[in-house]
Image (cartoon, helix red, strand yellow):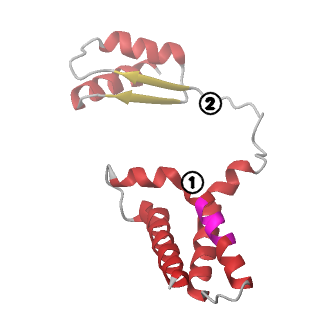
Amino acid sequence: MRVLSIQILSSIVLIFLLLFSVSFRFLWRYPLEMITHFRVYYFLVLGGLTIALLIAWRLGLKWKLSLYLALATLIFNSTFIIPWYLPNKFLGQETDLRVLEFNINTQNRQWEAISFSILEQKPDVAVLIEISAEAMEELQSRLETEV
């Protein structure tokens, strides 16, 4: 009876970890997507659970489905976690990408100052936040005439 309750408990934990691990594909709504941010902890718990299931397997408890499901979920989670710890061949290389982020606000009408700032900084990418259609047209026309 005790072995059966341990198997049921491990299966319930495994099912929850599996659902939490793959939920980023179908639960992309706040606050449900927040459960996908604990992937490292799922990985650690799954590692412990997989080791426990392997020990149970060696002791003669043949919980094939639980063991295979734990291994599959552990491998799935490892594809997201292990690359964080692998060497990055781009680390330390300098890049010359200039990014300008500008929070314009829809009520701002100082288009001359904004276009001057953009031209002065000469960014490769300019991100304009809270921009209205009117401001976008005005800035485009000012920047096209200056360039």
Q: Where is residue 44, by image quadrant? A: bottom right
The secondary element bearing badge 2 is classed as loop
Q: Could you say where residue 65 lies in the image, as x and y percent from the top left?
A: 56, 86
Q: Which residue is mark 1?
A: 41
The secondary element bearing badge 1 is classed as helix
Q: Which residues are magenta?
A: 45-51
> Label 2 near label 1: C-beta < 8 Å?
no
Q: Residues within 10 Å of mark 1 (few under 14, many from 20)?
A: few
The CA span between labels 1 and 2 is: 35 Å
Q: Which residue is mark 2?
A: 97
Residue 65 vs 44, above or below: the answer is below
Q: Residue at x 26, y 24 (%)?
A: 135
Residue 51 vs 88, above or below: the answer is below
Q: Say what amino acid the circle numbered 2 marks.
A: Leu
- Residue 75: mark: none
Q: Residue at x 29, y 28 (%)?
A: 130
